[in-house]
Every structure is written in C-alpha cells, then in structure tokens.
Image (cartoon, rainbow, N blue to C red):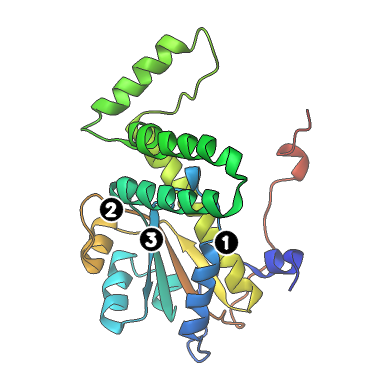
Amino acid sequence: MDLKEMLAHRRAIRVYDKTKHIDTERVADCLRLAQLAPTSSNMQLWECYHITDTKTLEALHRACLQQTSVTTAQELVVFVVRPDYVKRRATANLTFQEQNIREHFPKEKQEKYLKQWDMYYKKAIPFLYGRFFGLLGLLRKGLTQIASPFRPVPRQLSEADGDVILHKSCALVAETFMLAMSEIGYDTCPLEGFDSWRVKRALHLPFSAQISMIVSCGIRDEATELGERFRIPFEEQYFRI
C-alpha cells in the first residue's frame, strides 16, 4: 500500500474475526518499525509489551472493561511511558552521539559537537526531566517566569507538562505501529478505556510506569459494518497564515 491507502485502511476496529489468525512475528516487525518514530530529544522514554499469553490476555480483558475491541483481538500491545528511565536513556544517547561524531564528523568540528551533546545530555536533560515530588517542576516554572519578560522561553516545564510530552512522543510511536500494521493488512484499535492500575498489575510494572495506550491487534470481522468515517470539514480545522 502507499501512504494514502494505509491511512484509508486503518480504522479503529471494534470486532475482530477470531477465525483469521495473525503472525506474531510480523506484529513484532511492525513494532520494530515503530522505533523509527520521533520522540522528544530522542529520549525514547517508552516501551511496549506485546501480549500473546492467554492468561495475561484474560487479565487485560477485565482491565479493559471487556470491550469487544479487546476480547475479540488475538494480541494486544501495551505502550508504556517510563519517566524513570531518563538517566539510562540520556546515557545511551550520549554514548551513541560520541561514537557517531568521531566516525562521521570532520575532525576539526568534533570537539565542538562533543561538548554540545555532553552538556545537553548530562546537564540540560536531567534538569528538564528531573522529578522530586513536583519541586523541580516548580523551580523550572519559576525560572521561566523570571526569564520570560526578556526572551522567548519554553513554558511547559512542570512535571505534569513533562508527562504530556512523554505521552505525545509515545503516541507517535503507537501511530507508526498502527500504520505499519495496516501496510501488511492487519487491523488495530487504540484504546484509552482501561483500568491502568490493573494493567500495571497484570504486567508487573512499577508505580512510576505510566500506561499510555493499549492497541488491540487482529483482522477485522467483515460481517461487522464499519460505515463511513466521520471527520470534521477540513476548512474548520485548517488555517493557513
């Protein structure tokens, strides 16, 4: 499929055909492609849990309120945000960039770029993503208020704002996965109607982890009518300036 065909094919499927099976490895390949999605500062503070185990699926059925988009699905993917991974992801980014610069950048510019990335991932990222019972977020907001009369500054710096940023990045990953699934003819449905505490319990996730989205996977039941898509008129959402 080309992009237009993939977008037309992707629908939020509420009922799957249980007689049509999907290949688990092909779903995993789509998740590998989803790694190519952009994330804020390339921090990649997400992980996914590809659920194929029958007992875990049953536990998630209950956690997802017994929705048919889950109970008829063959597999589920739970996308999780991990704000507690800031240090390890920053270290991984910096290690990669150091090698990348030494291998691909002109020698006369390497020192400059190495210093920039070192400052960014060792100083800026820990400050921007740091958490301490909301106090670091208040400090960042306070510094923003002081500086804002004199220069443009980012204003979404509280810990709650940070969560929004992480979930936006994770949503880009989930959308990339769903389009990859459409490209091979598989169907998906993104879900937000779930009991996050029960989902975390089923997956043995720590308190700091946040469930961003659950995506059910399968092949649509052709006997279930989808009807036409409803979309707001483009002119009501598009503004050229």
Which label number is shown at residue 98?
none
In depth, the one of 145 and 160 nearer the eye is: 145
Q: Inspect the image, locate mark 1, and give the three-letter code of the amino acid beneath it.
A: Thr
Label whose residue precedes the other's in the sequence (3 or 2) = 3
Q: What residue type is labelled 3?
A: Glu
Mark 1 or mark 2, which is nearer the start of the sequence?
1
206, above or below 163, in the image: below
For marks 3 and 1 on the same chain, the one whose residue lies earlier in the sequence: 3
Type of the residue with mark 2: Ala
Which mark identifies residue 47?
A: 3
Q: In this view, does 20 lie to the left or right of 129?
A: right
Residue at horizontal 54%, vertical 72%? 30
Read off the residue under disc 1.
176
Report crowding for label 2: few under 14, some 14 to 19, many 20 or more residues within 10 A (C-alpha): some
Q: Which mark is residue 209?
A: 2
Between the residue at mark 2 and the residue at mark 1, the CA separation in whole angstroms equals 21 Å
Q: Which element is circle 1 on? A: helix
